[in-house]
Image (cartoon, helix red, strand yellow):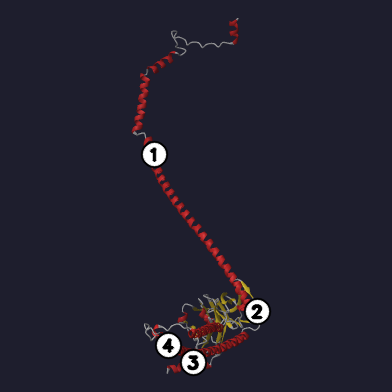
Amino acid sequence: MATALRLAVYLLLLAGGRGINVKVTQDVVEASLRGDIRLGCNYQTTHDERKNLFITWSKIIPDKEEDVTVILFQGKPYVMKDYEGRVEFVGGWNEGVADILLHNLNNEDNGDYTCAVTNVPDIEGHDTDTVQLIVLVPPSLPKISTSGAPELGGDIVLTCKSDEGAPKPQYFWKRLEEPDKEVAMPPKVVSDADAGTLTMKNLSLQSHNGIYQCTSKNKMGELSSDYQLTVSYPKSNALLYMGAMAGGVLLLILIIVVVVCCVRRRNRKNIDDNYSMTEEYRRDDKSPIPPGHQDFDPRDGNDEDRNLNYVDKDEHYDERSDHRYTDGYDRHRDNGDRNNDRRRDDFDRRRDDYDRRRDDNYHDDDRRRENYGRDDSSGDDRRREDYGRGREDYGRGREDYGRGREDYGRGREDYDRGREDYGRGRDNYGRGRDNYGRGREDYDRGREDYDSRDESYSNDDHPRRTRSQESLVDDQDKYSETNPRRTHSRENLDENAPSNRSNNVPKPPLKPKKILDDDVRDVEV
C-alpha cells in the first residue's frame, strides 16, 4: 500500500515537471597516464529544491548492455567499490556543478563517461550528456608477425602491433641495409599505417632481402622493432634436387649393370673359344689313355692286343667326351640366353621409367621457370656473383678473425706478465711497509727511552746530578786552599803591585834592543 502511494506521488511529480538541462564542459578530454583529470558537468534546473537531486556518473562499456556506475549523489556522495579512493565530487552540486575528479589514471580508464542529473519533479528535458576520456599511454614495444612464407616468387605480409598505446598508435615501415642506414623500399610494396601491415608480392632475392623496421608512434612517444627478411628457394625445388640425385644414382647403377653384363658376355665368348680349341687339340692329340681307363694287363707281352685295346678305348673316350661337353655347353648357352633376355627386358623397362621421369622433371622445370621469373634471365649470374663475393668476404673475415685471435693471445700474455709484475711489486711494497713499520716502532721506543732518561737527568733531585755538583765544589775548595802554586801566585800578584813593590825584588830583565844598520857600519869602521 505504501509503495503504491509513493509511486502515485512520483507519477504526479513527473506530470508536473518543468524541464532540466545537462551539459558537459568538454566533449573530449585527454590526460596522461597515472595523472589526475577533472570531468566537468553543469546542469540547470527550474526547481529550486534539492531534496530529490540525483546525480550519477557512469562509464559506457561497449561489450555490456548496462553501464558501470562510477559515483553517484543522493543526499550524499556514494563511490562504487572499484573506484574507491580514486574519484570524488568537486564543485557545488547545489549550484549546478556536478564535476568529478579522477585520480591515478590507468589504461582501463579510457572510454565514454555519462553525466546524468535528475531533480524531481524537474525531470524533463536533456538530463544526460557524455564526455570521452582518453588516457595518453605511450606505445609498447611493437611485435612483428608474418603471414605467408618468404620464398622466391611468393607473397608475404608483415604485421606490426603494439599491445598498449593511447591514442591508438600508427605504424611506419622502413627498410635498412645496415642498423643505421635506410634504403628505398622494394617496388610494389603496400603499407597501411593504421593496420600496421606491409605487403610484398613476387619476392626476389636481390630486391626484398634485408632488415625491415616498424615504428609504433603516437603523441606520447614511439618505439621500434626490426625484422630480418631472408628470401629462400621454394621447398619444391629441394624435392626436385632430391629427385635428380636419385635419378643420377639409378643411372649410375644402370651403367654399372651394363658394364658387368658386357664383361661377363666377353668372358663367356672367351670360354667358348677356348673350348673349341681344346676339342680340336684333343682330336689331334695321340697321348696315351689314362691308367684308369685301361683294360689290359701291362705285363702282357702281346703288342697287337694292346694296340687294339688302345684304339678301342681312345674312340670310346672321344665319343663320351664329345657328348658330355657338347650337351653341357648347349644347356649353359641356353640358360645364359634366357638370363640375358630377362636382363635386357628389365633394363628396357627401367630405361623407359627413367625417360618418363626425366620428361616429367623437364616439364616441371619449364613450368617453374615460367612461374618464377621469365624476365629475370640474369638471376643465376647475379646469384653466382653474390655467392663469390660472399665467399671472399667470408675468407677475409676468417683472416681478420685469425689476426684478432693472435693479437688477443699476445695481449693476454702481456696482461698476464703485467699482473705477475704487479703482484711482485705489491709483495715488495708490502715487505717494505712491514720493514718501515718495524723501524718506526724501534724508533718510537728509542725516543721514549731517550725522553725518559732526559727528564730524569734534568731533575735537580737526581742522585747522580747532586753528587756531581757536590764533588765539584769540594774540589774547588781543596784546590784553592792546599795548592801552593795558587797561593804563591796570589802573593806575587799582591807584591808586584806598583804601590807595594819592595826594593829587594829584582826587576825583570830588559828586552834586547834591535840593532840597526847604522850601528853595524859604525862598528866596522
Disc assigned to residue 5: none
Marks 3/1 in contact by CB < 8 Å: the verdict is: no
Q: Looking at this view, is 192 or 232 the one in front?
A: 232
Q: Nearer the viewer, mark 4 or mark 2?
A: 4
Q: Please say if 497 is above or below 428.
A: above
SS under mark 1: helix
Figure quadrant of the C terminus: top right
Q: Which residue is drawn at 58% across and 11% down?
A: 516
Q: Please say if 413 is above or below 146.
A: above
Disc assigned to residue 450: 1
Dot 4 amino acid type? Leu
- Local packing at callout 4 (Cα closer than 10 Å; few below 14, some 14-19, many 20+) is few
SS under mark 2: loop
Q: Is residue 478 at least partly visible in the picture?
A: yes
Drawn side of residue 457 relative to residue 93, left or right: left
Residue 31, quarter of picture: bottom right
Disc assigned to residue 378: 2
Q: Which of marks 1 and 4 is in front?
A: 4
- Local packing at callout 3 (Cα closer than 10 Å; few below 14, some 14-19, many 20+) is some
Marks 4 and 2 sit apart, C-alpha to C-alpha, by 94 Å
| Residue under pointer 4 | 308
| Residue under pointer 3 | 10
Q: Looking at this view, is 78 or 480 the one in front?
A: 480
Q: Is residue 126 at least partly visible in the picture?
A: no
Q: Nearer the viewer, mark 3 or mark 2?
A: 2
